[in-house]
Amino acid sequence: MSGADSRRPAQVEHVVQQREAGSKGAFFIADAAGEDVATMTYSRANASLITIDHTDVASSLAGQGVGRTLLDALVGWARRSNTKVMPLCPYAASQFKKDASIRDVLM
């Protein structure tokens, strides 16, 4: 018997990228054609503060933890860049409420 659980779907590695232009930015995952299939958008209030506006994940990626993958990438970036976060997006706000280990980046 192998150590893999045959009841769970295989997890696919998703590459999270970041883009920022002016006061708007996003962490995103693109498909093979370069189209965004998951995004977490933010607005920059100032040089050291962002507001998470919205999270959108394609239905084909539902249940794979993609929203959390985007949030983890954003939190890592916020820590490295000394950026504070205000989560207005309901999904992001719920994750911060559930997980104390990421609250250090909150405003």
Image (cartoon, rainbow, N blue to C red):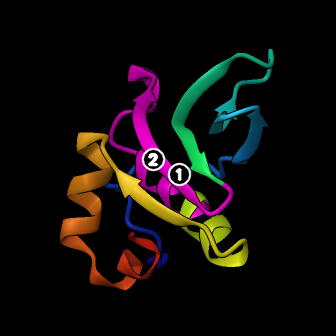
3D distance between C-alphas at marks 1 and 2: 4 Å
Image height of 107 relative to 85, above or below: below
Image height of 72 relative to 63, above or below: below
Amino acid, disc 2 = Thr
Residue 107 shown left or right of residue 37 in the figure: left
Categorize mark 2 by other alpha carbons within 10 Å: few (<14), some (14-19), many (20+): many
Residue 10 visible somewhere in the drawing: no
Task: Determine the residue positioned at 25% across, 54% down.
Answer: 93
Residue beneath disc 1: 50
Image height of 12 relative to 6, above or below: above
93 or 16: nearer the eye?
93
Identify the magenta region: 47-73
Residue beneath disc 2: 51
Amino acid, disc 1 = Ile
Of the 4 image quadrants, the one containing the C terminus is bottom left
Asked if marks 1 and 2 touch (Cβ < 8 Å), the reply is: yes
Is residue 60 inside the magenta stretch? yes
Quadrant housing residue 47: bottom right
Residue 8, horizontal then vertical, whole percent: 35, 55
Q: Say which element carries label 2.
A: strand
Q: Say which element carries label 1.
A: strand
Of the 4 image quadrants, the one containing the N terminus is bottom left
Quadrant housing residue 62: top left
Is residue 16 inside the magenta stretch? no
